[in-house]
């Protein structure tokens, strides 16, 4: 094991991420511990930057699946460099812009919804634009079909 390895407790303290979340990240393959199985989890010091990258990406609204896919593109589980970040951020721009656009539409339509107060599934422009759920059949379509 490397001399610069740190414990899971130290990694948690340095990154502000709970040890349980670090174990979850490890189970998802986002970070990796070093050392022997059955002993205290230890991480290379560069895991601090990798966990920080994960936290920043989550704060931007990226899913762990998106984050994992980006990190999987890096060789040998290394921390993203400035060039890596430039490529990753360019790839994420369309996803973030789509979310921004959806939030702007929601913001712009919110007044009409509050004004009517009905939240009618037939007329609500926010929850059921153009009564799309009605075309999918009867019953609780928003619970039965996540693609409505």
Image: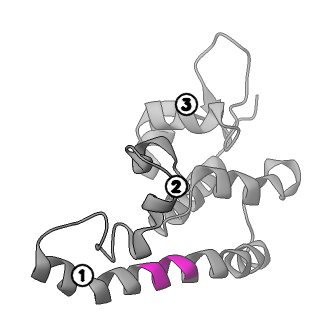
The residues colored magenta run 98-102
Quote the CA–CA distance across marks 2 and 1.
25 Å
Quickly name the residue at label 3.
Answer: 23
Quote the CA–CA distance across marks 3 and 2.
41 Å
* Residue at the image position 88 percent from the left and 54 percent from the top: 75
> Where in the figure is residue 38, as x and y percent of width and height?
65, 10
Quickly name the residue at label 1.
Answer: 110
Tag 2 or tag 3, which sits nearer the N-term? 3
Q: In the image shown, does 17 or 87 lie closer to the viewer? A: 87
Tell me if mark 1 has few (under 14), some (14-19) or many (20+) residues whose alpha carbon lies within 10 angstroms of its own: few
SS assignment at label 1: helix
Front position among marks 1 and 3: 1
Is residue 77 a member of the stretch shown in magenta?
no
Q: In the image shown, does 18 or 117 lie closer to the viewer? A: 117
Q: In the image shown, does 127 or 102 lie closer to the viewer? A: 127
Q: Residue 136 carries which label?
A: 2
Please indicate whether residue 59 sits to the left or right of residue 113 in the image: right
Q: How many marks?
A: 3
Are discs 2 and 1 less than 8 Å apart at CB? no
* Residue at the image position 65 percent from the left and 81 percent from the top: 94
């Amino acid at each position: 094991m490397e001399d610069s390895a740190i414990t899971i407790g130290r990694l948690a303290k340095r990154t502000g991420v709970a040890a349980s979340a670090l174990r979850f990240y490890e189970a998802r393959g986002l970070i990796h511990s070093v050392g022997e199985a059955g002993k205290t989890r230890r991480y290379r010091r560069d895991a601090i930057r990798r966990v920080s990258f994960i936290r920043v990406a989550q704060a931007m609204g990226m899913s762990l699946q998106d984050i994992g896919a980006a990190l999987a593109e890096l060789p040998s589980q290394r921390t993203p460099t400035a060039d890596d970040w430039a490529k990753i951020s360019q790839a994420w721009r369309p996803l973030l812009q789509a979310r921004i656009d959806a939030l702007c539409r929601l913001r712009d339509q919110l007044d009409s919804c509050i004004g009517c107060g009905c939240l009618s599934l037939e007329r609500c422009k926010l929850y059921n634009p153009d009564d799309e759920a009605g075309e999918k059949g009867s019953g609780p379509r928003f619970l039965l079909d996540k693609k409505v």
